[in-house]
Image: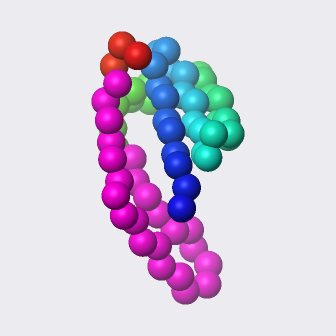
Amino acid sequence: MFKLFLRGREGRHVQLWLNGQKTVDYTEPDATIPQEGVFGLQIHQGAASEAWYKDITIVDRKGH
C-alpha cells in the first residue's frame, strides 16, 4: 500500500510526494502546454503484469 499526494498550485509548478517523500518538483517551461487535463494510473511496458487499485480518493483542495 502507498500514499500519493500531488500538488499543482502555483501556475505551472507541480510537486508529488510518495509515502511522505517528495519525488517530483517540476515547473513546466512551455506555456503552450494546457494547465488542465486528466491523469491516469498505468503499468509501463514490459513483462506481463497487472495493477489493482482500491479506495482511491481524489480531493480538490483549492486554496489550501
- Residue 55 found in image quarter: bottom left
Q: Is residue 50 magenta?
A: yes
Q: Is residue 28 visible?
A: no
Total marks shown come to: 0
- Residue 9 found in image quarter: top left
Q: Position of residue 64 (x, y in %)?
A: 40, 16
Of the pair 8 and 57, the residue shown nearer to us = 57
What is the magenta range?
Answer: 39-61
State whether residue 44 is above or below residue 38.
below
Of the pair 29 and 60, the residue shown nearer to us = 60
Majority secondary structure of magenta residues? loop
Task: State the residue at coordinates (61%, 84%).
Answer: 47
Task: State the residue at coordinates (38%, 29%).
Answer: 34
Task: State the residue at coordinates (53%, 82%).
Answer: 49
Of the pair 44 and 62, the residue shown nearer to us = 62
Q: Position of residue 23 (x, y in %)?
A: 67, 40
State whether residue 63 is above or below residue 19.
above
Quadrant for the N terminus in the image: bottom right
Q: Is residue 31 magenta?
A: no
Is 60 left or right of 14, judged from the image as shown? left
Q: Is residue 14 visible?
A: yes
* Display colour scheme: rainbow
Residue at the limit of the structure toward the bottom, as seen here: 48
Task: State the residue at coordinates (58%, 30%).
Answer: 15
